[in-house]
Image (cartoon, rainbow, N blue to C red):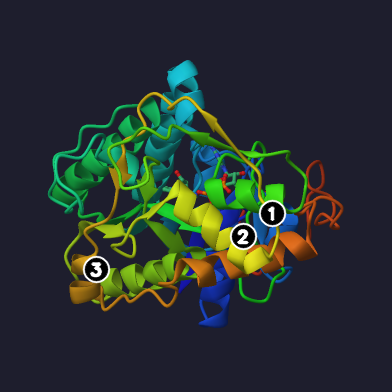
Amino acid sequence: MRLMVTGGAGYIGSHTVRMLKERGWDVVVYDDLSTGHSCAVPPDVPLVIGDVGDAPRVSAALREYDVQAVLHFAALSLVGESMENPRRYFERNVGGGLALLGAMLDNGVRYFVLSSTAAVYGEPEVVPIPEDHPLRPTNPYGDSKAFLETVLRRYEAAYGLRWMALRYFNAAGAHPDGDLGEDHRPETHLIPVVLQTALRQREAVVVFGNDYPTPDGTAVRDYVHVQDLAEAHVLALEGLLAGMPCTAYNLGIGRGYSVREVIAAAREVTGCEIPVRVGPRRPGDPPVLVAGAARIRRELGWYPRYERLEDIIATAWTWHRRHPRGFAGRAERPALAGRRAARPRRQRAGGGMWHA
Ligand SMILES: NC(=O)c1ccc[n+]([C@@H]2O[C@H](COP(=O)([O-])OP(=O)(O)OC[C@H]3O[C@@H](n4cnc5c(N)ncnc54)[C@H](O)[C@@H]3O)[C@@H](O)[C@H]2O)c1
């Protein structure tokens, strides 16, 4: 059975692709490389370069590779940028998601796993946040994911789509091999920013607000290892294929760490001094976001292997120390555009895609 992983050249997608391959799944990656890295895709995995909003191209790829299930990671995910440019987020995340789902329906592809987010909850009324907490996103990024979840429910009822939505809290860490990790530009996530500061690539970590109603005044988040996220995708896919109900699950370890605790743990792991500067709060940043994480454990048997913050940071530190420039300087996969690549295994009439 072949899977399409959209956004498989990105941070979480590339770790999931590698795990799927290790578990024997046949995978094709569909990515426009807007924030991803072609060299993060294993050389034996076909990479189709395209926008998920380009329905004819997605359709052709689904047919050409005989895809039966889609794991959809491809999206823009900067909260601040989404406030400044909501149009871009709605066009790419909602428009792109609708085009992809439409192409799936047109081609009889029934299984779908969505990368959703804790941002669908907005300012939580209760913490840890259960899955049945009302969805009240406070930014267009969260809106875009919440809307796609609604679409999934409607398409299930009307067209028999089989889906799961995984609402990640804060993805963190890197592959334990140390050769795959996080490389966002700009980098806005706390752990890579802290480790780049340890490597002296930044002068100081800016702590956005130290007057929150939390024990040390800084914001508290639930950090979940990228390998544990990858594992959850495998379980979600297996669950769907086994006939488990379509639903949304939180993905977090169910315990929060403050910004100051993350910095202290990073000092411990790296042995480096990590200078800190306190800045103002960021609008729309809730004081505490912690997942109610029991449901996915109970229903899919998912258990995070990385529950200690130090262990999560240690894997990220190995990646950053070994690759201080991230993927920069690594050989890109050849001929990213403008070349019709070698034929994939099954070529159909009119189905020629751009490959790398
Ligand atoms: N990183 C987190 O902490 C986090 C938390 C919650 C949810 N998520 C969600 O997880 C998913 C993956 O996040 P990530 O951190 O790996 O991001 P990423 O930016 O590293 O990866 C996204 C990938 O999708 C590709 N892409 C983006 N728009 C595309 C489009 N229109 N067509 C084709 N390809 C496109 C990019 O080139 C990139 O390879 C996203 O959907 C994000 O919203 C991430």
Q: CA distance from mark 2 to mark 3?
A: 32 Å
The front one of 150 and 139 is 139
Q: Earlier in the sequence, mark 1 or mark 2?
A: 2
Could you tell whether 252 is left or right of 280 in the image? left
The disc at residue 296 is 3
Q: Residue at x 78, y 43 (%)?
A: 337
The local secondary structure at tag 3 comes to helix
- Count all numbered tags in the image, as a single digit: 3
Q: Earlier in the sequence, mark 2 or mark 3?
A: 2
Could you tell whether 149 is left or right of 41 in the image? left
The disc at residue 273 is 1
Percent x, y of residue 123: 24, 34
Look at the numbered discs 1 and 2 and tell me whether their residues touch, using CB distance below 8 Å.
Answer: yes
The disc at residue 267 is 2
Could you tell whether 65 is left or right of 341 in the image? left
Q: Residue at x 12, y 50 (%)?
A: 132
**Residue type for callout 3:** Ile
Q: CA distance from mark 1 to mark 2?
A: 6 Å
